[in-house]
Amino acid sequence: EPEVTQTPSHQVTQMGQEVILRCVPISNHLYFYWYRQILGQKVEFLVSFYNNEISEKSEIFDDQFSVERPDGSNFTLKIRSTKLEDSAMYFCASTRGMGTDTQYFGPGTRLTVL
Amino acid sequence: AQKITQTQPGMFVQEKEAVTLDCTYDTSDQSYGLFWYKQPSSGEMIFLIYQGSYDEQNATEGRYSLNFQKARKSANLVISASQLGDSAMYFCPWRNDMRFGAGTRLTVKP
């Protein structure tokens, strides 16, 4: 069964450093999403992406964040200058279409900012 | 913006019994949907079931079913015959803007 994959599973970085989290969505899916979940807290929507552009973003997704689909398979989230409060689990998800299509989540990348 | 409310931060159920996890929402949309996801301690997000606003019947998927009450704006998840492996966090995000509520932590007791 196709699945969303994410790399790395765990990333440790120093405050102020740039990180890139990578996701490979399911191949025939067209909509891509990033979420984060600070330990013990709820899942927070960051951004949705369709047709090579951001379709929606939350207030969390400020200028420090960017997303890109550099080729036909990868979908990346970049954090330019990490802060301690960026430490969280980051989930990528994809869906075939809008509306009722189920979002399939990747296993997540745990980001630890020291 | 739509708002999702899960009023039960924690629930306990005896193994093999049924349990209902609450989810209410606030929207003026006529067409919408709600998902239920399970997040075990390992962290992955697992899709369970979907309910659309125009679905005439409550969604069912194995041991999972939705008690969808459109007038009350609730879409509660019913898990029948609970298993120890059902212990997890449960979320009911709103369709594809995917706003998550705080979740409910279900613990199944042997």
Image (cartoon, rainbow, N blue to C red):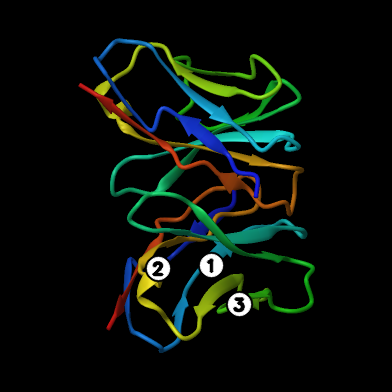
Tell me which residue sits at (41%, 89%) in the image: B17
Above or below: residue A82 compared with residue B65: above
The residue that disc 2 covers is: B7
**Type of the residue with mark 3:** Gly
Q: Which mark is residue A35?
A: none
| Disc 3 secondary structure class | loop
Q: Which of the two discs, 2 and 3, labels the residue nearer the N terminus?
A: 2
Q: How crowded is the residue under tag 2: few (<14 C-alpha within 10 Å), some, or many (20+)?
A: some
Give the residue furthest to the bottom.
B17
**Type of the residue with mark 1:** Thr
The residue that disc 3 covers is: B62
- In this rendering, position of residue B47 left or right of residue A85: right
Q: CA distance from mark 1 to mark 2?
A: 8 Å
Question: Is residue B37 or residue A106 the one in the foreground?
Answer: A106
The residue that disc 1 covers is: B24
Tell me which residue sits at (77%, 60%) in the image: B30
Q: How crowded is the residue under tag 3: few (<14 C-alpha within 10 Å), some, or many (20+)?
A: few
Which chain hosts label 1? B
Image location of residue A11, percent across then percent down: 33, 25
Tell me which residue sits at (77%, 58%) in the image: B31
